[in-house]
Image (cartoon, grey):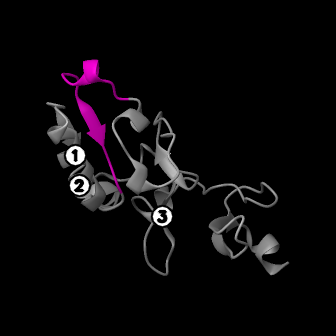
């Protein structure tokens, strides 16, 4: 979420994807007739969670076909803010053409705009990948 999102998207109150439930996303039983749009990096997790939603009775589950990467490649990144986390050594990529990319996330350490590196926090109290700028990474 810190890296990027669609304009106006609300942050789910989740720590990990495997704890995702309709309730964790703010969906209630009375919402089962309302359209629900879900999107993921490449679409695989949305396939899984979309099936869970349909099993739980949600009738109009929509997903972004091919995920955010496919959206960026076919539609551009006009409605996307920031970068996209990817699960390989690149860590983050622009959505749409690089020339259209809108900034990046702020540095976790100093708050500088457009951080472009990850730092693996090995401390057991942290155990996260933090987004940092080049200056803070060098420290």
Residue 81 visible in the displayed image:
no
Q: Secondary structure at mark 1?
A: helix
Classify residue 105 as left or right of residue 125: left
**Cα separation between marks 1 and 2:** 7 Å
Of labels 2 and 3, the one closer to you: 2
Q: Which residue is mark 3?
A: 85
Mark 2: few/some/many CA within 10 Å (<14, 14-19, 20+): few
Classify residue 63 as left or right of residue 101: left
Q: Which residue is mark 1?
A: 52
Residue 61 visible in the displayed image:
yes
The answer to whether the residue labelled 1 contacts the one labelled 2, judged by CB atoms less than 8 Å apart, is yes
Image vertical order of residue 44 relative to residue 8, above or below: below
Classify residue 94 as left or right of residue 50: right
- Residue at coordinates 85% horizontally, 78% vertically from top-left? 139
Q: Which residue is mark 2?
A: 48
Percent of width and height locating residue 70:
27, 60
Residue segment shown in magenta: 27-40
Mark 1: few/some/many CA within 10 Å (<14, 14-19, 20+): some
| Count of numbered badges drawn on the protein | 3
Percent of width and height locating residue 115:
68, 63
- Residue at coordinates 22% horizontally, 45% vertically from top-left? 52
Percent of width and height locating residue 121:
70, 72
Looking at this view, is 95 or 121 the one in front? 121
């Amino acid at each position: 979420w810190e890296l990027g999102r669609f304009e106006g998207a609300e942050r789910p109150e989740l720590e990990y994807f495997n704890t995702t439930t309709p309730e964790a996303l703010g969906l209630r039983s009375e919402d089962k007739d309302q359209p629900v749009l879900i999107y993921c990096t490449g679409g695989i997790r949305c396939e899984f969670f979309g099936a869970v939603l349909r099993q739980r009775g949600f009738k109009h589950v929509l997903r972004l076909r091919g995920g955010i990467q496919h959206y960026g490649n076919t539609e551009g990144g006009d409605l996307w803010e920031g970068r996209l986390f990817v699960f390989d050594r690149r860590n983050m990529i622009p959505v749409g053409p690089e020339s259209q990319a809108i900034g990046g996330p702020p540095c976790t350490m100093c708050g500088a705009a457009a951080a472009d590196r990850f730092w693996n926090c090995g401390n057991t109290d942290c155990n996260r990948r933090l987004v940092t700028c080049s200056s803070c990474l060098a420290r």
